[in-house]
Image (cartoon, grey):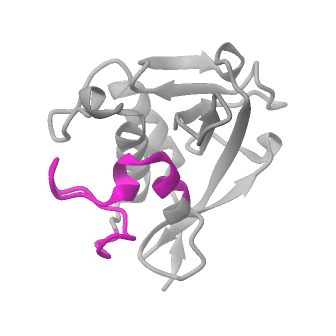
Amino acid sequence: MTLRPYNRQAAVDYAHRWAYLRNPDFYNFDELGGDCTNFASQCLYAGAGVMNYTPTFGWYYNSQYSRAPAWTGVPFFYNFLTRRKESPGPVGECVEIGDALPGDFVQLRFTAGPFAHNPVIVATGSLPTLDSVLVAAHSEDADYRPLSTYPIQEARFIHILGVNR
């Protein structure tokens, strides 16, 4: 497989376009536990252009009933992006806040439980901090929202390295 560039600007543009709306091509999961990772996946797909149709462990969306767990589940999204086995689709790694770029993702933990929110980073500032990193998200719809406004117990940043084709 060849690791191709990820179109960060396309992901960010998509995030701005749909932050306060719902793309009718995708089911709205707000009433089924939240739409944040569905929205994150849509943004990621806008920048990657490749899905992975591997049953159970892939990352794809065909419909509300035909999708991979990684398309809509916070931990599954992380596990897919940081997988070690080479397979089609976007590839990421966990990084420190200073290495995050627009088009990357941040997963937030609010309590002692699991990571529960998955915004897309739309801006970082010249020196990324919780105040300067701005995100777009669904569930609690937002665009250009500073990370510092969330009640964060822990954050992990996923930097997209590229897209396997």
Q: Let me know if residue 162 is in the magenta part.
A: no
Q: Is residue 151 left or right of residue 83?
A: right
Question: Splitting the image into 4 quarters, where does residue 106 fall?
Answer: top right
Residue 150 visible: yes
Q: Main secondary structure of the magenta part?
A: loop
From the viewer's perspective, is residue 110 above or below residue 57?
Answer: above
Q: Residue at x 35, y 26 (%)?
A: 17
Q: Is residue 5 visible?
A: no
Q: Position of residue 125 (x, y in %)?
A: 75, 27
Q: Nearer the viewer, residue 92 or 149?
A: 149
Q: Residue at x 58, y 17 (%)?
A: 145
Q: For the C terminus, give its image quadrant.
A: bottom left
Q: Residue at x 16, y 47 (%)?
A: 64
Residue 137 position within the rendered picture, expressed as x and y whole percent measured from the top left: 46, 27
Which image quadrant for residue 55? bottom left
Q: Residue at x 76, y 18 (%)?
A: 131
Of all residues, the one furthest to the front in this rendering is 112
Q: Which residue is at the far top?
A: 149
- Find residue 120 and report its horizontal and vertical position in percent: 53, 36
Indicate the quadrant where residue 24 lies.
Answer: top left
Q: Percent position (x, y) of residue 25?
A: 16, 41
Q: Provide the residue span drawn in magenta.
A: 52-78
Numbered circles on residues, count: 0
As for residue 65 lying within the magenta part, the answer is yes
Nearer to me, 127 or 39 = 39
In-image side of 51 versus 90 (left or right): left
